């Protein structure tokens, strides 16, 4: 049984529990996870009584290579809705069929529901959330292998660019060099738009690299990720360019300490909210709680941001095989920012850290 067939078997068992006759999977990373399909236009219909992937002629050749024989592959027009209605009528007549509500707009949902009703197969359509994402939470060995390769690429690309020095270069030039490096060493691409934010720009957690030239005595936040075999990596390093103002040096030390504490706290059985609190409480106790507005981290896999959410609201409990980031940040408006992010796999006895780029050692106590 292929890895995809095995995943679909687990999904079918979940559907039976939820008394669903089929799930319509329109979120492309979920389609890829379950069938191997890679492309921009596909819907999978998975049920106990049938499995289909619908796509269009642009993907006829690649989909035949990617999708295993147990799945019926339907090559139709670019608008997949007519084929979808036929597929659910064939697989789940008279049954309940779930739509992925988190990825289906109200307009699209209404359109699909109307087309399914036209098929006149007595099908009830119901919104469903998180079925496939629940399976994707725990990565298998091959998935972790791909994420490790993506993480290694980021380490290499960053080292190459830092070796050339940062001072005197525009943020945008550094971002471009990082991206070129990722492609050169075999990445399928960056896993998100690379962030290079120097000086006061570092106080914006999702700053867009601009023409600002990096100066001395600043913090430079560099956040980048690669894609390898479809899987993402994610890492942030904050690099000082010389002697820092006291406030920035203190913020860096505190962030590094909070990040270390959170890494040490990664363990099966810990909830995502508890893990978030480890870093947040440390930063809060130092009086900088308001400067750490975002969550501690997020899951990473086929998507750069996926379950579980590692935040104050994070309800998932860590389990071996989950891949998450640990990325506290402290942002001081007008001055600069610091974020330190590692990618980790939860293991039976803690965390395996996949990010190996060195972290700057700054001691604010000497200032
Ligand atoms: Zn990141
Ligand atoms: Zn991240």
Image: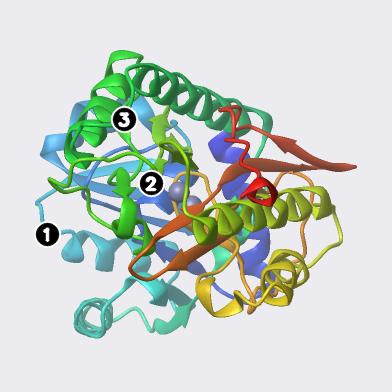
- In the image, the residue with mark 1 has its CB under 8 Å from the nearest atom of ligand 2: no
Tell which tag, 1 or 3, sits nearer the viewer.
3
The x and y percentages for residue 153 are 45, 22
Residue shown at 39%/43% (left/top)?
A: 217
Residue shown at 31%/27% (left/top)?
A: 188
The earlier-in-sequence mark between 1 and 2 is: 1
Picture layout, residue 82 above or below residue 43: below
Q: CA distance from mark 1 to mark 2?
A: 52 Å
- In the image, the residue with mark 2 has its CB under 8 Å from the nearest atom of ligand 1: no
Local SS, label 3? loop
What numbered label is drawn on residue 218?
2
The earlier-in-sequence mark between 3 and 2 is: 3
- In the image, the residue with mark 3 has its CB under 8 Å from the nearest atom of ligand 1: no
Q: Residues within 10 Å of mark 3 (few under 14, many from 20)?
A: many
- Is 232 on the left or on the right of 56, as rendered? right
The x and y percentages for residue 23 are 46, 66
What numbered label is drawn on residue 79?
1
Q: CA distance from mark 1 to mark 3?
A: 48 Å
Local SS, label 2? loop
What numbered label is drawn on residue 339?
none
What numbered label is drawn on residue 166?
3
Picture layout, residue 209 above or below residue 47: above
């Amino acid at each position: 049984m292929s890895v995809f067939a095995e995943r679909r078997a687990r999904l079918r068992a979940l559907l039976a529990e939820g008394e669903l006759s089929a799930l319509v999977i329109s979120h492309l990373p979920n389609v890829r996870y379950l069938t191997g399909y890679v492309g921009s236009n596909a819907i999978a219909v998975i049920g106990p009584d049938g499995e289909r992937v619908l796509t269009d002629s642009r993907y006829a050749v690649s989909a035949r290579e990617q999708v295993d024989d147990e799945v019926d592959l339907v090559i139709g027009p670019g608008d997949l809705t007519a084929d979808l209605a036929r597929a659910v009528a064939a697989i789940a007549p008279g049954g309940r069929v779930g739509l992925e509500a988190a990825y289906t707009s109200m307009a699209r949902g209404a359109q699909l529901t109307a087309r399914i009703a036209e098929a006149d197969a007595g099908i009830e359509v119901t919104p469903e959330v998180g079925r496939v994402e629940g399976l994707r939470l725990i990565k298998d060995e091959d998935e972790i292998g791909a994420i490790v390769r993506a993480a290694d690429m980021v380490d290499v690309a960053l080292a190459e660019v830092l070796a050339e020095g940062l001072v005197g270069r525009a943020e945008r030039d550094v971002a471009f060099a990082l991206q070129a490096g990722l492609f050169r060493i075999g990445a399928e691409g960056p896993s998100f738009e690379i962030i290079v934010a120097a000086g006061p720009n570092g106080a914006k957690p999702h700053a867009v690299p601009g023409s600002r030239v990096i100066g001395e005595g600043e913090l430079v936040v560099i956040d980048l990720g690669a894609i390898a075999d479809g899987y993402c990596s994610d890492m942030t390093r904050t690099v000082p360019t010389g002697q820092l103002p006291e406030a920035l040096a203190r913020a860096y030390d505190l962030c590094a300490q909070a990040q270390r504490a959170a890494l040490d706290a990664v363990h099966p059985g810990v909830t995502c909210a508890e893990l978030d609190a480890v870093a947040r409480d440390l930063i809060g106790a130092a009086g900088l709680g308001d400067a750490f507005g975002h969550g501690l981290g997020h899951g990473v896999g086929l998507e750069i941001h996926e379950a579980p959410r590692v935040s104050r609201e994070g309800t998932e409990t860590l389990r071996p095989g989950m891949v998450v980031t640990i990325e506290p940040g402290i942002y001081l408006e007008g001055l600069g920012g610091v974020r330190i992010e590692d990618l980790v796999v939860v293991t039976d006895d803690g965390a395996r850290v996949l990010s190996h780029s060195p972290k700057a050692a700054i001691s604010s106590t000497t200032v």
